[in-house]
């Protein structure tokens, strides 16, 4: 048979997908982390404010010194004016300026607690506090940006509005940084989980398809959409199903053929046998010697036994190959035995047998195929009729005790005696096979005074 | 009156022999080697003997066709096949079944039984010991006195069931289910009681029955 081979391209491979995911994860860490840092730093130096009104210290310092430089020879009024304008721009900041005499001039807001005259110790104390990082964040610039002018202006901003010391970013930006990192990591986890989840889902689907057989006992094919490894597995699975289906069909065909052959063969063997019987019967009508009549009687008996042999042979063939139809049902064996004996009664009566039946009044049920059990009993009764004529007695008994028991008994010479015609063996083999399949067993007790066959459940 | 048998058999040897044998026994035999024309001829026949393995049309197909054409004509199947399913399929329309190689006496005996069964509806009176039975009028007459014996409907049904199956031993289950038309219940004594009453009507000495024979532990029989 032609084998369809699908070439696995690199583009369709699961391995490629997996490499892409891992590679992107490996790139995100060394590239993504600095990228975030760069973006945040750029933002930090882009203006005097960071996100959410947080002030950028270096930008503020630059701005304050530039403003102070502009006020080199300004009048006190224009310095006041400049501060007021700046206050509007930086509403959260406190501002004041001190002239060359050491007197505090404009305070914005007015509530600022400052001495009106700046002594040298106070000035030193103030500068110390401003640079220590405790208290407010302060920027001090000399007017005109020249220390010689002696007057200076100060900008104060609460520490909470400023980024943490030692970092260009405040707490918020750090949180953003970490959460972006977490998000990137989460994304990677999610994508790889999705990747494996989808593989798993497809595998489970395949497993379900494999373990759920259709009516025929063979699983149904699955829908294979993709061309990756699992897709190829699905295709291979479908190919296998198709092959199984084909072989099952072939098997069924062969089975039907064999049955047909057996039926035809049986016909072809029996038809000439019937013709022989016809001619033998025709001969009987002619004037014959005693010897001739004896021969004809023998021919007649042999025709019967050959007919039975053919029947048994084909039954055995069917039975051994499991093609003999078996339909078990709940059967009352008492009733069945009675009907069976009623059918056999005239035959035994004609041969002068004493017929003994011992059947209980109540029903006894077995789960068997009636036809099979009838055939088994037929076989035993037939044997009694043929081989136990000398005893002139047949008994069919059914006992209800211990799940039920059927007994066929005779007073013949026993099974080892020479009266056994050839062909009885296969009949007993059929009975044994049928009993086994019906989960029954037979025990044969045979002696010179008779034979008893006990059939009971296993 | 010669009884006409429509005999369908493809084997020339067997066909010739059976035809001659049945003719010797007083039958009129119409022998066909294939089933094609059978349906047209069945109307003139009293009995059909049909071989299963026919060339052309399958024996079962022919059988079903004949039964449809003439439902009252009994069919006896002759078969060389033994597979069980054949038996079941055949018995759906066939009235009896005989496997090859059959004995001519057995074939004749089976045909007698089929005829008798069919005869129950043909109107000819039957004789059974001192009884003269008119199946059509459902009447039983004492042939010695000419007096009618009155029987109940169930008693008549039982008697006719025996007559249809003369020579066969019938179990109480079979009788109950055939006459009452429902499944036999375990331990039911109805059949025994009815047969006792029936014997009181028809037997000369009900304590020593001669018509309906008791087969101990098995059932009853009316001998042919």
Image: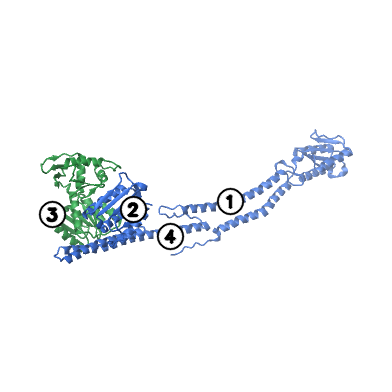
Chain colours: A blue, B green
Q: CA distance from mark 3 to mark 2?
A: 51 Å
Q: Are marks 1 and 4 in contact (CB under 8 Å)?
A: no
| Closer to viewer: mark 3 or mark 4 | 3
Quick one: quadrant of the N terminus of chain A?
bottom left
Q: Is residue A374 at least partly visible in the picture?
A: no
Of discs 3 and 2, which sits in the foreground?
Answer: 2
Residue at mark 1:
A193
Mark 4: secondary structure: helix
For disc 4, the chain is: A
- Of residue A310 and residue A215, the one placed in the foreground of this image is A310
Front tag of 2 and 4: 2
Residue position marked by numbered label 4 in the rendering: A243
Residues marked 2 and 4, same chain: yes
- Label 3 sits on residue: B2
Q: Secondary structure at mark 2?
A: strand
Q: Chain of mark 2?
A: A
Eyeballing the image, is A58 above or below A391? above
Q: Chain of mark 3?
A: B
- Left or right, residue A248 beside residue B19: right
Where is residue A421? Give x, y as percent.
27, 62
The subunit carrying tag 1 is A
Q: Secondary structure at mark 1?
A: helix
Q: How packed is label 3: few (under 14 Cα within 10 Å), some, or many (20 or more)? A: few
- What label sits on residue A454 in the rendered view? 2
- What is the C-alpha distance between the residues marked 1 and 4? 36 Å
Depth order, front residue of A415/B162: A415
Say few, some or many: other residues with alpha carbon within 10 Å of mark 2 (under 14 / 14 to 19 / 20 or more): some
């Amino acid at each position: 048979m032609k084998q369809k081979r699908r070439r696995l391209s690199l583009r369709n491979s699961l391995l490629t997908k997996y490499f892409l995911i891992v590679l992107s994860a490996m790139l995100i860490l060394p590239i993504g982390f600095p990228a975030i840092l760069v973006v945040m730093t750029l933002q930090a130096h882009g203006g005097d404010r960071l996100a959410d009104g947080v002030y950028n210290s270096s930008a503020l310092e630059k701005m304050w010194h530039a403003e102070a430089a502009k006020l080199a020879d300004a009048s006190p009024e224009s310095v006041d004016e400049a501060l007021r304008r700046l206050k509007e721009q930086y509403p959260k900041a406190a501002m004041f300026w001190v002239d060359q005499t050491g007197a505090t001039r404009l305070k914005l807001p007015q509530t600022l607690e400052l001495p009106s005259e700046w002594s040298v110790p106070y000035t030193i104390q103030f500068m110390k506090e401003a640079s220590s990082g405790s208290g407010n964040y302060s920027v001090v610039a000399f007017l005109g940006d020249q220390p010689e002018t002696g007057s200076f202006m100060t900008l104060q901003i609460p520490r909470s509005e400023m980024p943490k010391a030692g970092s260009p970013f405040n707490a918020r930006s750090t949180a953003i940084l970490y959460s972006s990192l977490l998000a990137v990591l989460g994304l990677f986890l999610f994508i790889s989980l999705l990747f494996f989840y989808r593989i798993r889902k497809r595998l489970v689907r395949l497993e379900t398809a494999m373990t759920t057989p259709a009516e025929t006992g063979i699983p149904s094919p699955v829908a294979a959409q993709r061309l990756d490894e699992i897709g190829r597995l699905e295709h291979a699975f479908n190919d296998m199903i198709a092959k199984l289906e084909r072989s099952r069909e072939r098997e069924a065909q062969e089975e039907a053929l064999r049955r047909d052959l057996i039926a035809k063969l049986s016909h072809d063997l029996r038809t000439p046998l019937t013709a022989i019987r016809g001619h033998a019967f025709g001969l009987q009508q002619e004037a014959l010697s005693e010897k001739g009549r004896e021969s004809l009687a023998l021919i007649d008996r042999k025709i019967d036994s050959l007919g039975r042999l053919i029947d048994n042979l084909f039954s055995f063939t069917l039975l051994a190959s499991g093609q003999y139809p078996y339909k078990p049902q709940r059967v009352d064996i008492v009733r069945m035995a009675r009907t069976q004996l009623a059918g056999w009664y005239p035959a035994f009566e004609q041969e002068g047998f004493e017929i003994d039946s011992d059947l209980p009044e109540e029903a006894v049920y077995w789960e068997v195929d009636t036809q099979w059990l009838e055939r088994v009993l037929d076989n035993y009764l037939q044997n009694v009729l043929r081989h136990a004529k000398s005893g002139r007695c047949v008994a069919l008994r059914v006992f209800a005790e211990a799940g039920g028991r059927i007994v066929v008994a005779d007073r013949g010479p026993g099974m080892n005696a020479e009266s056994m015609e050839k062909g009885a063996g296969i009949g007993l083999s059929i009975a044994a096979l049928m009993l086994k399949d019906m989960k029954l067993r037979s025990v044969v007790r045979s002696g010179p005074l008779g034979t008893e066959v006990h059939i009971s459940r296993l | 009156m010669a009884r006409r048998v429509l005999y369908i058999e493809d084997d020339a040897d067997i066909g010739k022999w059976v035809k001659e044998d049945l003719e010797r026994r007083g039958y009129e035999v119409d022998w066909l080697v294939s089933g094609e024309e059978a349906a047209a001829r069945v109307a003139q026949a009293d009995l059909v003997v049909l071989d299963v393995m026919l060339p052309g049309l399958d024996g079962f197909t022919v059988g079903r066709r004949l039964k449809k054409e003439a439902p009252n004509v009994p069919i006896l199947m002759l078969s060389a096949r033994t597979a069980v399913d054949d038996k079941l399929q055949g018995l759906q329309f066939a009235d009896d079944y005989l496997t090859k190689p059959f004995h001519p006496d057995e074939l004749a005996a089976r045909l007698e039984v089929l005829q008798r069964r069919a005869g129950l509806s043909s109107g000819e009176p039957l004789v059974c010991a001192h009884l003269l039975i008119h199946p059509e009028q459902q009447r039983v007459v004492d042939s010695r006195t000419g007096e009618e014996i009155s029987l109940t409907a169930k008693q008549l049904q039982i008697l006719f069931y025996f007559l249809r199956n003369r020579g066969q031993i019938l179990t109480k289950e079979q009788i109950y289910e055939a006459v009452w038309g429902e499944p036999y219940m375990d331990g039911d004594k109805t059949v025994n009681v009815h047969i006792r009453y029936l014997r009181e009507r028809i037997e000369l000495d009900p304590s020593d029955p001669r018509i309906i024979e008791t087969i101990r532990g098995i059932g009853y029989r009316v001998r042919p």
